[in-house]
Image (tube, rainbow, N blue to C red):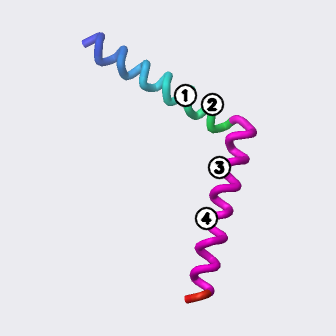
Amino acid sequence: DGTYHESLESFKDQRLKLMDLLSQEKDSNLIGRKDNYLGWRMVQQLEHN
């Protein structure tokens, strides 16, 4: 069935575009900072408990 294959290809294409966006410097820096902040908060809470 060609239609299924086409939709699968477009899905892969969209995923590639998303990965491309995520890999851009500015975005990855923002994501990294957010992750570091969340990790820091978890450590703080663990130390208080």
Q: CA distance from mark 4 to mark 3?
A: 11 Å
Residue 7 sits in quarter: top left
Q: Is residue 34 above or below residue 29?
A: below
Q: Name which residue lies at 66% across and 63% down.
A: 37
**Residue 29 spot, x, y in % from top left:** 73, 47
Instruction: Work out whether mark 2 precedes mark 4 in sequence or the reverse, and give the earlier one.
Output: 2
User: Label 2: few (<14), some or many (≥20) within 10 Å?
Assistant: few
Q: Is residue 3 above or below residue 37?
A: above
What amino acid is at disc 1? Leu
In the picture, the quarter occupied by the N terminus is top left
What amino acid is at disc 2? Asp
Q: Which mark is residue 20?
A: 2
Q: Name which residue lies at 69% across and 44% down.
A: 28
Q: CA distance from mark 4 to mark 1?
A: 27 Å
* Callout 2: SS: helix
Q: Name which residue lies at 59% across and 73% down.
A: 42
User: Label 3: few (<14), some or many (≥20) within 10 Å?
Assistant: few
Pick the residue in front: 2 or 49: 49
Q: CA distance from mark 3 to mark 2?
A: 14 Å
Instruction: Work out whether mark 4 precedes mark 3 in sequence or the reverse, and give the earlier one.
Output: 3
Q: Nearer the viewer, mark 2 or mark 4?
A: 4
Span shown in magenta: 24-47
